[in-house]
Image (cartoon, rainbow, N blue to C red):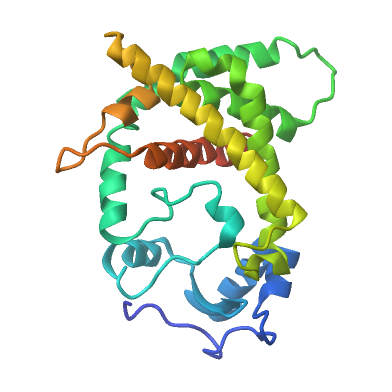
């Protein structure tokens, strides 16, 4: 830590409940809880998610220092069983050498030049959306932007030939995110993985749909590559990526990174557009 990480007030952080830590305050309104930590305790603030001790870092430069220089001293917050069903052990979860390897492999597939190639898909989807609007009509902006970014993410990440599978992918992702949010705000977060609540069963079913859809996309692209077809899309680039030892992403890693990129390209973007 640098010398500028100086908390205000007590160093003990907010009051913690036995066993629960700060879960009640966090679950009620996570953004407001984190704002209260920042405002009440300065650049960094200790808090607890159940028995897990955490530190909230508010300044970007300090977050960069933690992520890049002191990974042996701190680990990302463990977000529970439900969260792991989506990104698995993808680049946003991995640490150390594994993170560096995956970051290098994925980074080569999402360079600015390649992202700009998705512009035509973005414009096509946006035009199709607004063509159904009329002056004076009222729309649910958040829902429309979520639908728009879902369609763009599916086509950009899985290729234009995946357009017909937007509905099952989007429905499964919506279910998974809903169940993740519910678990993340409740006591089920602390249950062992083998305890399958109704919410966890719905989460696993949604993840199974995503697994099948992504496997279908991977097989299509492998067949196209074997036939000599040159596709300039994300699945093809991920399949072709190699690490320093010449090793490719495994089947599980392809799945994890695809879902990670989908979440990053859909949820945050739809919120920004809204």
Q: Is residue 71 left or right of residue 188?
A: left
Residue at x 72%, y 35% (from the top left corner): 142
Residue placed most toward the observer, 148 or 73: 73
Residue at x 42%, y 22% (from the top left corner): 219
Q: Is residue 36 visible?
A: yes
Residue 205 appears at what percent x and percent y?
Answer: 66, 41
Q: Quick one: which residue is furthest to the front in this view?
A: 194
Q: Quadrant of residue 104?
A: top left
Residue at x 31%, y 68% (from the top left corner): 71
- The quadrant of the rendering that contains the N terminus is bottom left
Residue 120 appears at what percent x and percent y?
Answer: 47, 13
Q: Quadrant of residue 235?
A: top left
Depicted 210 relative to depicted 80: above or below:
above
Residue placed most toward the observer, 144 or 17: 17
The number of numbered badges drawn on the structure is: 0
Residue 102 appears at what percent x and percent y?
Answer: 31, 46
Depicted 1 relative to depicted 77: above or below:
below
Q: Is residue 178 visible?
A: no
């Amino acid at each position: 830590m640098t010398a500028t990480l100086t908390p205000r007030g007590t160093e003990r952080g907010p009051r913690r409940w036995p066993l629960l830590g700060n879960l009640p305050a966090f679950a009620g309104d996570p953004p407001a809880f984190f704002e209260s930590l920042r405002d009440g305790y300065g650049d960094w603030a200790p808090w607890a998610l159940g028995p897990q001790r955490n530190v909230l870092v508010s300044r970007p430069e300090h977050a960069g220092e933690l992520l890049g220089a002191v990974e042996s001293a701190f680990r990302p917050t463990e977000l529970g069983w439900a969260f792991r069903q989506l990104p698995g052990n993808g680049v946003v979860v991995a640490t150390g050498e594994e993170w560096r390897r995956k970051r290098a492999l994925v980074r080569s597939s999402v360079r600015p030049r390649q992202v700009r190639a998705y512009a035509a898909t973005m414009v096509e989807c946006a035009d199709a959306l607004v063509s159904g609007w009329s002056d004076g009509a009222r729309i649910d902006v958040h829902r429309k932007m979520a639908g728009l970014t879902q369609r763009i993410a599916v086509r950009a990440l899985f290729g234009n030939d995946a357009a017909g599978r937007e509905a099952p992918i989007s429905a499964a992702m919506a279910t998974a995110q809903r169940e993740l949010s519910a678990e993340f705000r409740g006591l089920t977060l602390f249950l062992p993985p083998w305890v399958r609540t109704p919410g966890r069963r719905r989460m696993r079913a949604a993840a199974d749909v995503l697994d099948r859809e992504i496997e279908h996309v991977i097989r299509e692209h492998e067949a196209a590559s074997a036939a000599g077809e040159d596709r300039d899309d994300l699945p093809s680039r991920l399949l072709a990526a190699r690490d320093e030892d010449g090793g490719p992403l495994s089947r599980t890693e392809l799945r994890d990174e695809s879902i990670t990129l989908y979440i990053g390209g859909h949820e945050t973007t739809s919120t920004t557009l809204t």
